Image (tube, coloured by chain):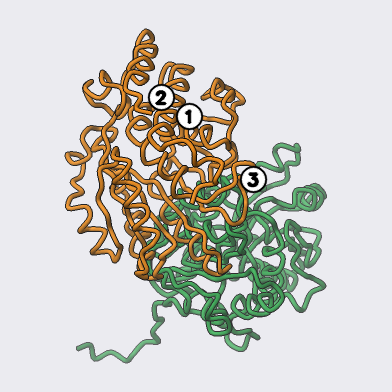
Chain colours: A orange, B green
């Protein structure tokens, strides 16, 4: 479903480049949510290079699939994907988080082409998605709305208001993506506020749920295809278990934190380790 | 059982209370009918509510346009974020609930999903200020203060059925978000007796007078007009400047009228004296070095009692009689 011009590069290579873009932005600021970005890169690669319809040169094209990032702190990950998709120019990466940049550290719609909503205040994205799906159905559009959430965001009650509403309105044009890295600000998400059994919870709210290894591109591709192809009059959720720091071994094994520490001399090592694992 | 003769009993005013005095002319559901009329011209209008269509008069729209009405359930955070989503897709959403729930419960959703993006969502809310006897759970005595702090938000507090009918197309034409306080049910009609029509951002001098200037919004303009008549009978001239748009204020009109020396200036509002029209006017006058004797008719900075609305309005000083008495006292000081 991706644009033909984009299809000659493998998804694993796309994911590698997204990770590389994220690390380079992290190096600019000396910080950033690179743990999350590395973890979710495969989900973004499959989203932008397999599932979504869009026109890189026209980010507001009416027929596009909408990708809502409610987890604003994942902006570094989405910028990395938007650069790879050609929606943002690669040289803008060097402005990440700087004064006057279009790439602020928390994602905001008014700053960045391809950023559909202002995230950051967690628990708002899925409700906005419900309204957009209702609007798309009014317009008889066959576009989909994707909303990338996190396991921590499921703490917010408003997410579940929206989940109830999406099944009430039979929003079969809605695909929620839940990044489960089991890490939020105060520690392991499962310890902060238990969320399992997650698939059963979404199903109980009237959704069609798939749980996949969010770092397995083949599994992700199959799940995205199944979600789009389903004819059930239900919203769909892909619960994606991911590993913080994926692709950079010393970050994969470092003590887990919401904000992974990367020292100044470690950015080069991170890039080297990422390159060493490149499979394309 | 008490054997004493039955006393006349004032009942607690419920959600359906009307502010109309006995014999006063009223119009039914002016918001709902105005929205239906506008929706015939504008196909982009949709209506959403959080289980309060009947109590915000949106049921009139829902009956006329069932395919353009979204019942979102008792979920105000969802109501506001979904309205934002519909606005993003090019629609013009009117979202209704009670003022307490929009201002207190859904504030961050209005702030980030609607106002920060300057989306044209029209938030229309019943039970503003002290218009129910149900107590603080339903009395939105601080809603204006809350929304005044929100960038991009326009705040409208119409007086009567005429004002509401005039405001609906005006707020729809405004490109940004609007918070409008709503009177619903059988709403009094007063302003058709004056040379007046609602214009967003404009205050209107409804009557002139030499001794006191009353700046007012919402139904307090009705009370101000009645108080002015009562004061006139005592030889006191009272001007009434109706300011239904609280943000942005019609600064020029207020400065012009308040700057005419020698008059007591009274701001009358159905809202806490903290953070509403009164303080907005006071700071405007101070910034421009206009310094009349200044008083406020408004609700105290307190959680208010439950009870019958007429009793509460007298107790808290916003009934016509209480307001008239206050003004006479201030003029005598």
Q: Nearer the viewer, mark 1 or mark 3?
A: 3
Q: Is residue B306 visible?
A: no
Q: Nearer the viewer, mark 2 or mark 3?
A: 3
Disc 1 to disc 2: CB gap under 8 Å = yes
Please name the residue that numbered disc 3 is placed on.
A58
Residue at mark 2: chain = A
Q: Position of residue B300 (x, y in %)?
A: 48, 54
Please name the residue that numbered disc 2 is placed on.
A32
Residue in the image at 54% along x and 45% along y = A4
Q: Is residue A66 left or right of residue A275?
A: right
Tags 1 and 2 both on a single chain: yes
Q: Hey, which quadrant is residue A101 in on the image? A: top right
Residue at mark 1: chain = A
SS for tag 2?
loop
| Mark drawn on residue A105 | 1
Q: Position of residue A237 (x, y in %)?
A: 33, 55
| Mark drawn on residue A130 | none
Residue B139 or residue B73, whichever sits in front: B73
SS for tag 3?
loop
Q: Position of residue B298 (x, y in %)?
A: 55, 57
Residue at the top extreme? A265
Crowd rating for badge 3 (residues with CA inside 10 Å; few <14, some 14–19, many 20+):
few
Q: Return the disc, 2 or 3, that comes first in the chain's sequence.
A: 2
SS for tag 1?
loop
Disc 1 and disc 2: Cα gap in Å?
8 Å
Disc 1 and disc 3: Cα gap in Å?
23 Å
Q: Hey, which quadrant is residue B8 in on the image? A: bottom left
Residue in the image at 62% along x and 49% along y = A60
Q: Is residue B102 left or right of residue B166?
A: left
Tags 2 and 3 both on a single chain: yes
Disc 2 and disc 3: Cα gap in Å?
28 Å
Q: Position of residue B146 (x, y in %)?
A: 51, 50
């Amino acid at each position: 479903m991706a644009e033909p011009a984009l299809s000659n590069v493998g998804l694993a290579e796309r994911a590698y480049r997204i990770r590389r873009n994220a690390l380079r932005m992290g190096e600019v600021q000396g910080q950033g949510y690179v743990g999350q970005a590395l973890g979710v890169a495969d989900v973004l690669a499959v989203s932008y290079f397999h599932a979504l319809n869009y026109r890189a040169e026209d980010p507001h094209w009416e027929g596009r699939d909408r990708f809502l990032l409610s987890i604003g702190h994942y902006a570094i990950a989405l910028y990395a994907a938007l650069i790879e998709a050609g929606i943002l120019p690669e040289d803008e990466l060097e402005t990440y988080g700087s004064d006057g940049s279009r790439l602020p550290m928390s994602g905001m719609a008014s700053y960045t082409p391809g950023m559909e909503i202002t995230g950051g205040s967690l628990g708002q994205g899925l409700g906005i998605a419900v309204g957009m799906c209702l609007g798309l159905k009014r317009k008889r559009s066959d576009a989909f709305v994707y909303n990338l959430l996190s396991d921590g965001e499921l703490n917010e009650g408003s997410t579940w208001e929206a989940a109830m509403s999406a099944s009430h309105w039979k929003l079969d044009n809605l695909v929620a993506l839940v990044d489960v890295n089991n890490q939020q600000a105060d520690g392991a998400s499962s310890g902060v506020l238990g969320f399992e059994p997650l698939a059963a919870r979404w199903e109980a709210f009237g959704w069609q749920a798939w749980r996949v290894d969010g770092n397995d591109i083949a599994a992700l591709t199959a799940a995205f295809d199944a979600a789009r192809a389903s004819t059930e009059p239900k919203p769909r959720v892909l619960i994606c278990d991911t590993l913080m720091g994926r692709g950079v071994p010393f970050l994969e094994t470092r003590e887990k934190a919401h904000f992974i520490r990367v020292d100044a001399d470690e950015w080069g090592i991170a890039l080297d380790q990422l390159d060493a694992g490149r499979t394309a | 059982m008490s054997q004493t003769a039955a006393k006349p009993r004032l009942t607690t005013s419920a959600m359906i209370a009307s502010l109309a005095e006995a014999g006063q002319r009223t119009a039914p559901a002016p918001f709902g009918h105005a929205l239906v009329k506008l929706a015939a011209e504008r196909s982009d209008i949709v209506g959403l509510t959080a289980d309060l269509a009947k109590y915000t008069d949106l049921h009139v729209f829902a009956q006329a346009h069932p395919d353009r009405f979204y019942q979102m359930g008792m979920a105000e955070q969802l109501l506001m974020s979904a309205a934002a989503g519909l606005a993003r897709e090019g629609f013009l959403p009117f979202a209704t609930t009670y003022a307490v729930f929009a201002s207190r419960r859904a504030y961050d959703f209005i702030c980030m999903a609607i106002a920060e993006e300057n989306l044209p969502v029209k938030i229309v809310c019943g039970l503003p200020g002290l218009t129910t006897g149900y107590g603080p759970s339903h009395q939105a005595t601080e809603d204006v203060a809350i929304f005044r702090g929100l960038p991009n938000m326009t705040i409208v507090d119409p007086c009567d059925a005429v004002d509401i009918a005039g405001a609906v197309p005006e707020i729809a034409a405004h490109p940004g978000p609007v918070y409008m306080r709503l009177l619903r049910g059988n709403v009094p009609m007063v302003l058709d007796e004056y040379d007046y029509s609602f214009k967003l951002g404009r205050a209107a001098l409804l009557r002139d007078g030499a001794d006191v200037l009353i700046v007012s919004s919402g139904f307090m303009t009705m009370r101000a007009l009645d108080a002015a008549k009562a004061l006139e009978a005592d030889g006191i001239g009272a001007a009434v400047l109706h300011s239904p748009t609280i943000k942005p204020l019609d600064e020029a009109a207020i400065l012009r009228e308040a700057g005419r020396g020698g008059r007591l200036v009274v701001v009358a509002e159905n809202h806490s004296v903290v953070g509403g029209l009164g303080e907005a006017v006071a700071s405007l006058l101070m910034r421009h070095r206009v310094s009349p004797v200044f008083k406020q008719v408004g609700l105290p900075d307190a959680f208010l009692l439950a009870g019958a609305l007429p009793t509460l309005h007298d107790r808290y000083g916003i009934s016509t009689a209480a307001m008239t008495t206050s003004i006479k006292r201030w003029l005598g000081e």
